[in-house]
Image (tube, rainbow, N blue to C red):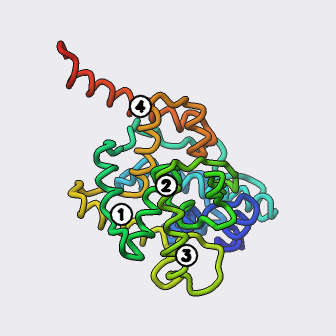
């Protein structure tokens, strides 16, 4: 039996897949397994027809094409593992096509909205100073929220103004910090971090309990500050990452440099931000050109 937990452990060890992705893959595979059981088969014995029927079921259920693609990614990796283990000799995923993805432009934030969000924390408070530093670092570097909360002291250099990020697939990249982010990070390290640290750990940003902060906790903190700043609902750490990318492009950043900063393995992933920048430039033209 090719146990899901064993497969995920192997995936984490061999490919450095994030815990967030592993959790999503686990959920996808368990749901598929539960769908197969009343139909008299199992995950390890699933046929191509089973997969096609399940994908049709997901489409009928209204599951977003991106979620369907993630399921296919999980199940393809799973059956690759099954083949390597010699449990079966055929791959039911062979020649299966991923659902067509609708073109989508990431939702960003204006520079004014970002400024309001960054000004919201009360820096005279320990947690407020921590959150201010986290928000400034996030906007200055474009880190994924998982990369931010997992940041280690050994991965930052205040003197050089750099962050060494271990991203998806265990790939490393160096990202510069701006002066504002450096200032607030140094203040946090000097004042707030010693108060939050319950034991000698390498984590940069601690929770109130002295643990590594959870992604969900920081997401809720951003929502809290968005309310204080009077911003609309839907503000998330990922929106701040999008803002980082969009604002750099608006100010003339090179697409290849942006790809390196964001940690995208494929330039096509980064190119979506050019559409955001074009839309913003068109809006500015219409607002300010005398014949707009």
Number of other residues with Cα within 10 Å of mark 2, as a class: few under 14, some 14 to 19, many 20 or more: many
Q: Foreground residue, 86 or 184?
A: 184
Residue 4 higher or lower than 53, as above or below: below
Task: Please rate how many residues cluster around mark 4, counting C-alpha atoms within 10 Å: few if below 14, some from 14 to 19, many from 20.
Answer: some
* Disc on the earlier residue, 2 or 1: 2
- Estimate how packed mark 3 is, as few (under 14), some (14 to 19) or many (20 or more) residues with alpha carbons within 10 Å: some
Q: Earlier in the sequence, mark 4 or mark 3?
A: 3
In the drawing, does residue 245 fall left or right of residue 227? right
Residue located at (55% from left, 70% from top): 189
Q: How far apart are marks 3 and 1 (CA)?
A: 17 Å
Q: Position of residue 230 (x, y in %)?
A: 21, 57
Q: Is mark 1 on a helix, strand or loop?
A: helix
Q: Residue 250 carries which label?
A: 4
SS category of the residue bearing label 3? loop
Q: How far apart are marks 3 and 2 (CA)?
A: 20 Å
Q: Where is residue 176 drawn, in percent x and y?
A: 59, 47
Q: Residue at x 42, y 55 (%)?
A: 58
Residue 243 found in image quarter: top left
Q: Mark 3 points at which residue?
A: 212
Front residue of 97/109: it is 109
At horizontal 67% and vertical 61% (from top left) the residue drawn is 155
Q: Tell me, for residue 181, which label it has, or none.
A: 2
Q: Can residue 175 be seen in this view?
A: yes
Distance, label 2 to label 1, CA atoms, is: 17 Å
Circle nearer the viewer, 3 or 2: 2
Q: Which of marks 3 and 2 is nearer the N terminus?
A: 2
Q: How far apart are marks 1 and 4 (CA)?
A: 24 Å
Is residue 147 left or right of 91 when viewed as pictured? left
- Answer whether labels 2 and 1 touch (C-beta < 8 Å): no
């Amino acid at each position: 039996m090719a146990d899901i937990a064993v497969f995920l452990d192997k995936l984490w060890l061999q490919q450095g897949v994030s815990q967030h992705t592993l959790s999503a893959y686990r959920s996808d595979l368990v749901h598929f397994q539960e769908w197969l059981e009343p139909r008299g088969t199992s995950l390890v014995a699933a046929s191509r027809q089973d997969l096609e029927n399940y994908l049709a079921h997901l489409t009928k259920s209204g599951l977003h094409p991106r979620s369907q693609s993630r399921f296919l990614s999980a199940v393809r990796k799973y059956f690759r593992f099954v083949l390597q283990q010699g449990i079966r000799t055929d791959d039911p995923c062979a020649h299966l096509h991923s659902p067509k993805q609708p073109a989508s432009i990431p939702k960003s934030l204006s520079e004014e909205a970002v400024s309001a969000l960054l000004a919201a924390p009360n820096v005279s408070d320990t947690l407020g100073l921590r959150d201010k530093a986290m928000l400034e670092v996030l906007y200055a570097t474009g880190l994924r929220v998982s990369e931010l909360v997992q940041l280690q002291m050994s991965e930052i250099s205040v003197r050089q103004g750099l962050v060494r990020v271990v991203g998806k697939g265990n790939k490393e990249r160096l990202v510069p910090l701006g002066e504002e982010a450096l200032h607030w990070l140094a203040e946090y390290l000097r004042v707030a971090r010693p108060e939050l640290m319950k034991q000698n750990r390498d984590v940069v940003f601690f929770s109130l309990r002295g643990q590594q902060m959870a992604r969900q906790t920081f997401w809720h903190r951003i929502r809290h500050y968005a309310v204080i700043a009077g911003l609309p609902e839907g503000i998330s750490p990922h929106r701040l990452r999008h803002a980082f990318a969009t604002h750099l492009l608006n100010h003339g950043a090179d697409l290849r440099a942006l790809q390196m900063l964001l940690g995208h393995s494929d330039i096509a992933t980064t190119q979506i931000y050019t559409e955001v920048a074009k839309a913003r430039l068109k809006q500015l033209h219409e607002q300010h050109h005398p014949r707009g």
